Amino acid sequence: MKSRVAAVLLTVASSASTTLAFQSPMNKNHVKYYAPNSVSPFALKQHHVSQTGKSKLATTTTELHSIAPAAALSAVGSPLGSIAVLAFVILVHEAGHFIAARSFGIEVEEFSVGVGPRIVGVRRSLVDSEYVYDRIDDGAEKEHQNQNDNAIEFSLRAIPLGGYVRFPENYNRTLTFEQEDSARRARNKARQLRIENSNALEKVLESMAAYSFIFNVLSLGLLKKWQSKRVEDQLREAEEEVSLVTQATTVAKKPWWNALPFGKGDSGTADTTSDESLSTLELLKSAKAPAVEYDANPDLLQNRPAFQRAVVLSGGVIFNILLAFACYFGELTVGRGLPEPIFNPGVVVSQTVSNDSPAYGILKKGDVILGVNEVSSISSSKRGIWGSQEQISNVISTIRETQNGEDVKLTIVHGIDSATDVVSVSPKRNMDGQASIGVMLGPNYVKTEMVRASNVVDAVSKAGAAVYDITSATAGSITKLLVGVLFGKGLPAGASMSGPIGVVKAGADVVSSSDLAAVVAFAASISVNLAVINSLPLPALDGGQLVFVLAEAVAGRKIDQQIQESINAAALTLLLFVSIGTA
């Protein structure tokens, strides 16, 4: 596997969404629009505090204005259009890595949009100071494919939900693998030799140390340390044995006549013993991990200064942020503007309360909840969508914390001219043990205003503010999710996570609207999601690899590259499973 800087498509979000559908309690007409400062590519997930404990989702009808250029995209097919948007966002991310690397003169082997089998590819080579482009034939001989060390491959692969920039290795991976495999077999033989001369307890401990990672962890490394000591003793004893046999052979020199055909002697036994000892010593020495010879080529990414490697690793995230900024800037200047939803305080009961709900006969559709337990605990310091969605999450969290036998007191308003009222609802426990009042909640939406820029400076300011809002909200949602998962609390109230398939489905809904502004805003939202996710300090992600670079800069020495690659490979596999599992 080559060194790669890849994009991981996995969205983690709060209930704030890109495609939003609100219903005002004062206006029974549904209003749908595409929010530019959204967290993730989902239809708005109105929260159902249900008796089953599962957050049910609901979206209202679609009413969007068509723009001619987007109609062509929709005609191709909504899923294909959605995939095209995702592929473009990933293309921009990988372009950030690629441009950063090439600007420093760092060698690149391949720039790929998509993963899996290659559909089409072009190789660019520098021949006589001119660039020559050749179509890549995967069936050709490997020697032909790599005949030019400075060639760069540009590939389009079958699965567009990912991508990578591949850099040349700085060591012979095939040779290293063969050497490590040979050393592994030698270690197994050496362990068998130790077991032959061990008691029953030592045999059990040897097996536990060799095959059980759990026992090694539980013993705080003492079991592995004990095994390492036995390996050192085995090697030392073998060296001493060879030394003694060599000395004995030298001292017991035979008379010259023993070399005659009729001479007698016992040199055969001594030679056999010496050969066996030497063979055992060679086996034990070959069991050591082989030393890896690294290429010192200064044009390789691994050999560049920490600053340059950090810039290359950050290039994808920076380009994704710039893409989102460009999308918002375009909408503010040449587009219809950025939609800014206006909300009143409180959350709305957005659907008819079912007969089996604890709130049946107490709450009704259109009621506005202003507080819980006679305290305005649903207030939020955030503005717009973020504040409204935080209010919904606060209501759900407060209800879930209700103890058995306690009522939830809700401060509500029944209509425009109605006075504030306080009602009590007795929550019921669902299958997950969480308290629920069985109603669907939505934001207290009033209207949407289209914001445009008066000049370029104003557009830069407003586009920057929009990028800041969506980035900070996305990062905040991910932080809450990670904290909840790490401390066993599960997903926070109103939080959701989706993989590539879910993103494609949400994108298909947006593309099918034939609204160019909605498609642009969807691309901006996905771009920020990709930037934030890849910024996480987790192995296999850009942020995780950046941690290794910073650690090396602080420590003043290299971290073993093979250890880094093993950690990244394991983490990438886990992320792929999570991404597929959250489809």
Image (cartoon, rainbow, N blue to C red):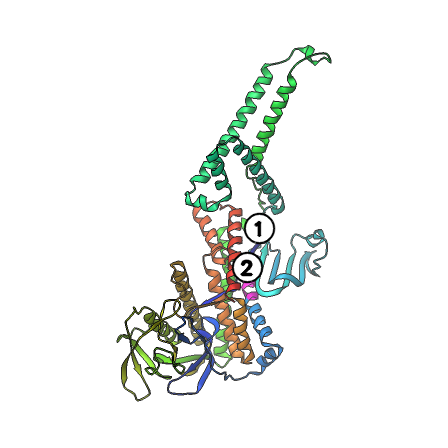
| Magenta stretch: includes residue 431 | no
Identify the element where label 1 is drawn.
Answer: loop
Residue 72 seen in render: yes
Q: Going from the N terminus, do you reach mark 2 or mark 1 first?
A: 2
Q: Is residue 37 visible?
A: no
Q: Which mark is residue 300?
A: 1
| Magenta residue span | 90-101
Q: Residue at x 67, y 62 (%)?
A: 121
Closer to us: 13 or 128: 13
Q: Residue at x 59, y 71 (%)?
A: 84
Q: Amino acid at mark 1?
A: Leu
Separation (CA) of disc 2 from disc 1: 17 Å
Q: Quadrant of residue 112?
A: bottom right
Residue 109 occupies quadrant? bottom right
Of 172 and 30, which appears nearest the observer?
Answer: 30
Residue with the mark numbered 2: 6
